[in-house]
Image: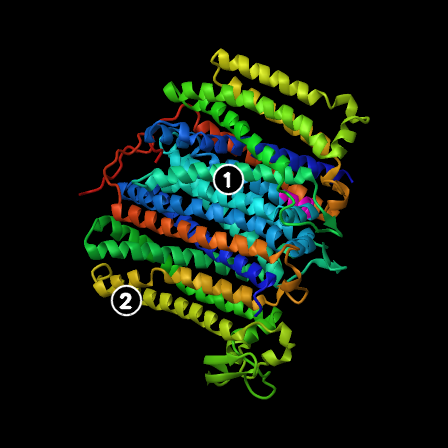
Amino acid sequence: MILIYVWAGLIALAMILYIVLDGISLGVGLLFPTARDEKERSILMNSIGPVWDANQTWLVFGGGAIFVAFPVVYGVLSSALYIPLIAFLCGLIFRGVAFEFRAEAARKEPWNMAFFSGSLVAVLSQGFTLGGVLTGIAVRGDQFAGKPLDWLNPFSIMVGIALIPGYVMLGSTYLLIKTEGPVQERAYKHAFWSGLIVLVFMAIVTVWTPYHYPLVWTNWFSPPRIYFVWVFPLLGLIAAYQLARSLRSRQEVKPLVYSVGLFLSGYLGLITSLYPYAIPPTVTLQEAAAQGETLRFTLWGAVIVLPMVVGYIIYSYSVFRGKVSHEEYY
Amino acid sequence: MEINLVFLSRVQFALTTMFHILFPVLTMGLALFLVVVELLWLGTREEIYYRMYRFWVKIFAINFGVGVVTGIVLEFEFGTNFSRFAQAVANVFSPLLAYEVMTAFFLEAGFLGIMLFGWKRIHPGIHFLATCLVALGSFLSSFWILAANSWMQTPVGYRLADGKFWAVDFATVIFNPSMPARVSHMLMASFEASVFAVAGISAYFLLRGKEEAFFRRSLGVALIMAALFAPLQIYLGDYSGRVMFHHQPAKLAAIEAHWETNTRGGAPFAVIAFPDMEKEQNRFEITVPDGLSLLITHTRNGRVPGLKEFPRQDRPNAAILFWTFRLMVAIGTIFLLIMIWAGVLWRKGKLFETRLFLRALVAIQPLGFLATELGWITTEMGRQPWLVYNLFRTAEGVSPIPVENVIWSLSLLFIIYPIIGGSYFFYVLKTLRRGPDLSSPIPPIQRPAGMRALRE
């Protein structure tokens, strides 16, 4: 049924939107210890202050969309990845409240800590979640049938660690647009180094994933995938090269664009590797899908409402365009 | 009750929802209050309304953030702790949650930044629009969540096959029998709790003699709104009760500690009762003859099914529900009495000067939030042992995970939530104690020609 693939596409879109937008916010959070004083920390926070909530909402939409379109995925993955998911949510809680609490606090240290560590926990948990999915999930009937720590293995640890430079790259290239002076200068350095490390990790992941998960290997080297699967690493390399060039020539906007391109190449490669499995290695999109009526009813809403949502979010970003200062927006 | 996976999962869900709900309650009520205040600012050009907005929005901002992050936990908690339930009802239930995110959550999140931070950057009309849209987003959120929650209470529009629910008609699902009553009752509860909070805080400052002109105005606006909400909420509560009678008789019987169906004459209303679930009777009670029949059916002899008509395993816990319900109603009544007192004082022109009244306002401040929790306990515990009323039991809905997982997460939340809650109170009180900022320059774009400045 075509509806299933429309929803799969929509969820994929929501997920990459979340990964990039909140990746920026989480990246800024990871960069927090690099700020020299409270003024600089305030600059970092103000760069994402008005938009972090809308960014995070794509996660809520993605989760809701998975619940609607692929309820088996929602239920099974939530049970299988219980520990990293709860850890992720706790990280988000601390990251989220830090914005408001830090603004009101006289002693900002505890909330600086909360902002950084909340972001770090969230990023690592995302890695464990993704690594756990790629490792494969035990399913019986339509319920999770594995053990609580199945997601914990060297591969998922590596994925978690790999996300750190990834988001630092997104966060620092975003800061190139929103900041100036010494903060921006330092952001150029962070963007360069994190971009390099991301490239290294992408190479590791490209080799390790099929080793860890043989189905991917078969996928890649059989038609039709064998004809185009090489496009993604190529795109990644081009993006990385352009990123380095734009950083060296002190561009402000292009680095973020190329960073996103780098992420996109990895993301699309991942999707191509996993398709058609919703839950590797046994549950396909078809098997996990909800009732047709449900998909149709909710799709109506998505098609009408989401373009408006994107519209007013773009508007919101445009209201806050330009460089930020350390002063409170209030 | 055994301490096992089902019990601990329920405790965790209860903890996360009971903590979370306090924040949207204030968000919805304060958002409405801020819409009114900004309208007054734009309409009257009196500086005091601008200052009022800027003061109360600080509380709003702190409150909103905590509400969002604790709310995200809930969206995923259906899957983490009750995945069997989530997967069984997904076809019918999940679209309502998705619509909540698309039409409400995004709306609030999208315009919040502009509302909080956009003062210098946008036209005042756009800012007012942002305030309105954030408020609308929060109300819509309530609508969708309560529609989904109400479907669990009064399920319709579905087909049940092999333990799985299939949607037959979504309009029916959304506009299920208990939805209008519960949505309106919840919205009104949020409004009422919030305006009494604003009133109490304002009264506190007036008693201290601080910033009198400012807090008189805040108190005035809050009380006018409360005068509307207090009686309306009592009506809505009664309406909810009658809906419950028609669709959830076991729940009503438990709430009223009503054991025997009245076959001759009217059912008595218990003012005080100590139900004994084992012995199927009340250990002690003080009743009003025919009272329950009159209240529920509006006739003296109306038949009200007793708890004993239902199998033991289908009976909600009357011992708890009897008291949570009555305490909630008592609070609603207190609010009404306070407003009657306020009316009398206002007529006499002594509203802001009567210290006893101001002290009473300070004292009742948290009661609206307490009533909201009591109401939620009543409705959700009253739905037990069902997740979907009469169709799907809570015990069948938990995730296939070891109890150790839940012990871990519950312990984590028991540490984290008090830290968040405590910090929240600390910073809100700090912001309040700092008092309103009456001197910062008003952004030029907001400053109209012919503004009526604060007389000091």
Q: Are marks 2 and 1 in contact (CB under 8 Å)?
A: no
Amino acid type of the residue tagged 2 in the rendering: Val
Location of residue A215 (image quadrant): top right
Amino acid type of the residue tagged 1 in the rendering: Val
**Prevailing SS of the magenta stretch:** helix
| Depth check, front residue: B86 or A186 | A186
Per the image, the residue denoted by label 1 is A121
| Depth check, front residue: A267 or B44 | A267
Residue interval drawn in magenta: A65-71
Residue at 39 percent across and 26 percent down: it is A324
- Answer yes or no: is residue B236 visible: no
Q: Secondary structure at mark 2?
A: helix
**Relative side of A232 to A255, left or right:** right
Chain that bears disc 1: A
Per the image, the residue denoted by label 2 is B344
Q: Residues within 10 Å of mark 1 (few under 14, many from 20)?
A: many
Q: Nearer the viewer, mark 2 or mark 1?
A: 1
- Dividing the image into 4 quarters, which one contains the N terminus of chain B? bottom right
Location of residue A311 (image quadrant): top right
Please, is residue A330 above or below residue B214 in the view? above
Residue A84 coordinates in the image, percent (x, y): 57, 44
B81 in the magenta segment:
no
Residue at 62 percent across and 60 percent down: it is B152
CA distance separating discs 2 and 1: 56 Å
Q: Secondary structure at mark 1?
A: helix
Please, is residue B32 above or below residue B342 in the view? above
Residue at 56 percent across and 42 percent down: it is A60
Marks 2, 1 in one chain: no
